[in-house]
Image: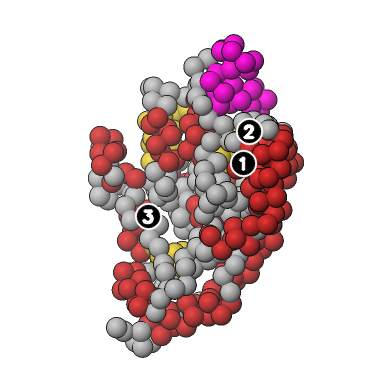
Amino acid sequence: MIELMPIAEQFRSLKSEILSEIADTIEQGTYILGPKVRQLEQKIAYLSGSDHAIAVANGTDALVLTLDAYGIGPGDEVITTPYTFVATSEAISRVGATPVFVDIDQSWNLDPARIEEAITPRTKAILPVHLFGQPADMEEIMRIAARFGLIVIEDACQAFGAAYRDKSVGSIGHAACFSFFPSKNLGTIGDGGLILTSDSALAEAVRELRQHGSAKRYYHHRVGYNSRLDELHAAVLLVVLEKVNEWNERRIALADRYYEQLSTLSSITLPMRTPERKHVYNLFCIRSAERDRIRERLLARNIQSGIYYPKPLHLQKVYEGLGYNIGSFPEAERLSLEALALPMGPLLTEQQQDAVINALQDIEAGQGEL
């Protein structure tokens, strides 16, 4: 079987280095917010060009703590995309604010041309997602935010290493959130997350919130959370961090091969790419009106694929009270019926990728029938 994302193989390739770091962690004896967490934070802040990096328990918590630290809560609205993983809107709801959805553009990200019409006196922030590793149109989003005095929080959970106009995602908005879930470009063998910002007041607030609202042990300034990245995951991430640039370049090279070999197929549409955006392909998703048939034919050839995402957020039961309906966001709704993720990852071989390419070519030629 050609896996959609050969995650275990990636970690196995670094097993000796990871075990060495874990052994060192056991020996040094500090397991929560210790030296490896600080080292990871410092390295990522430096690489991103941000002043502060604050590691937390997971990507969802990164979003929640950032919203909370900005004082966003009941009565407030946050504009975001309906075409993403639920954690984005869930975090908005978790702090008591209301997610306000705006349809997507051809990059499959939040469409800046539709943002202004969604702004109300209750709007406090814009939360764009760099979906699948493709940066959103941050220049236009930041222009709109400046005009209306809004905060911009980047959901960069799928986009570690991506860039927009040569600026690292995560360093463009007022703050940014990352996930270290195992399938991410920078992932660990469990959960983890991180917040980037150059806003010192925000960084101080987030550091307090992640530690029970405490800046000094047993002294609590606000109601907080228990959301800390532990030393073992930091140890793993320090190893993977050394490989992430190389692995991202490999993802880009594999994406280039998909573009070269699949561009003539009329049954599929390849993801948009533009010179100003460095896409790091956490997922390589095509779209097709024949999505389900293609997926079935690929599986018959022992090739995994994935559907991201089968139902946009505005049509999920959890948000039925917001009053959206089928037709509210037609671009997101169409994409949910057509998007299909192909195998992608730094350890995918060209031979495996050729098998995927050949299968898609055969399916279009009518030779891939069951």
Count residues near mark 3 (Cα–Cα under 10 Å), then give few for <14, some for 14-19, many for 20+: many
Q: What residue is at 50 percent from the left and 24 percent from the top?
A: 225
Q: Which mark is residue 176?
A: none
199 lies left or right of 103: right
The disc labelled 1 sits on which kind of residue? Leu
Q: CA distance from mark 1 to mark 2?
A: 7 Å
The disc labelled 2 sits on which kind of residue? Tyr
Spot occupied by residue 91 in the image (x, y as percentages of width and height): 43, 34
The disc labelled 3 sits on which kind of residue? Tyr
Q: What residue is at 70 percent from the left and 50 percent from the top?
A: 20
Q: In which quadrant will I find the C terminus? A: bottom left
Q: Can you identify the residue that label 3 sits on?
A: 309
Q: Is residue 262 above or below residue 22?
A: below
Q: What residue is at 28 percent from the left and 46 percent from the top?
A: 315
Q: Which mark is residue 31?
A: 2
Count residues near mark 1 (Cα–Cα under 10 Å), then give few for <14, some for 14-19, many for 20+: many
Q: In the rendered structure, which segment of residues is drawn in magenta?
A: 199-220
Q: Is residue 138 magenta?
A: no
